[in-house]
Amino acid sequence: LAAAKRELAGSSYPHGGFSVDFIAGSGDPVQTTVAQIIQAELKPLNINVKIRQLDPSQVTVQEQSFHFGMRETYWTMDIVDPDEYVSFVLDGTAGAYANWTHFNDPVIDKLIREAEVTFNTATRQALYTQIQQRAAADAPIVWLGYSPYDYVYSSAVHGFHVYPEGNAHLENVWLSR
């Protein structure tokens, strides 16, 4: 948020004077804490963040009907290919409407289509670099952090591996005595 503050301070964007709602699942300490931090960080910019605590099922309803200003969410990958992320989170023509933001950049959509069918590693990397740059400049998403997974287990546990997408297959895990 500090970078966003500096960006706003040196820009022609309006300097606050508006309100936005932040939907958070009641009883969800992560969403509530993130909402409170954002509320506190935006207050000096004269942006009033109103936190709406909702039943978690209603957060989804509000999200999917586009009745929210801000929300906290997370992402995990089922595969190691970046296509899954960009297709769900940035593609305005896909079924999730750019992760329920209604963001739609036809150039990003076109780059996604090209990257999906490109097998040359260097060409594909160049396409994803363009997607990343455009998204960072224009998408209504602020990536706040990365939460790596920490795994602690005994030296008696064998065969435990976490794959890059976060899955751990336990069928080959065994304990020594």
Image (tube, helix red, strand yellow):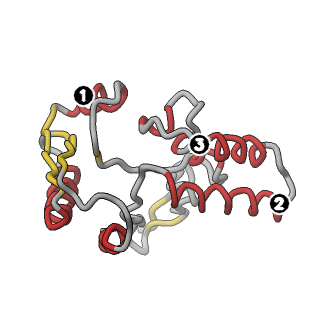
Residue 57: image tag = 1
Q: Amino acid at mark 2?
A: Thr
- The residue nearer to you, when weighing 73 against 17, is 17
The earlier-in-sequence mark between 3 and 2 is 3
Decide: is 90 above or below 41.
Answer: above
Disc 3 to disc 2: CB gap under 8 Å: no
The earlier-in-sequence mark between 1 and 3 is 1
For the residue carrying disc 2, how many other residues have a C-alpha within 10 Å: few (<14), some (14-19), or many (20+)?
A: few
For the residue carrying disc 1, how many other residues have a C-alpha within 10 Å: few (<14), some (14-19), or many (20+)?
A: few
Which residue corresponds to mark 2? 123
Which residue corresponds to mark 3? 105
Residue 47 percent location from the top left of the image: 18, 56
Residue 67 percent location from the top left of the image: 28, 30
Farthest residue toward the front?
12
The earlier-in-sequence mark between 2 and 1 is 1
Locate the C terminus by quadrant. Answer: bottom left
Locate the N terminus by quadrant. Answer: bottom left
* SS at circle 3: loop
Q: Amino acid at mark 3?
A: Asp
Q: Is residue 114 visible?
A: yes
**Residue in the picture at 50% in, 32% down:** 97
**Residue in the picture at 52% in, 60% down:** 137
**Residue in the picture at 19% in, 40% down:** 25
Query: Which marked residue is nearer to the observer: mark 2 or mark 1?
Result: 2
- The residue nearer to you, when weighing 25 against 108, is 108
Q: Is residue 152 visible?
A: no
Query: Which marked residue is nearer to the observer: mark 1 or mark 3?
Result: 3
Query: Which marked residue is nearer to the observer: mark 3 or mark 2?
Result: 3
Left or right relative to 87: residue 30 = left
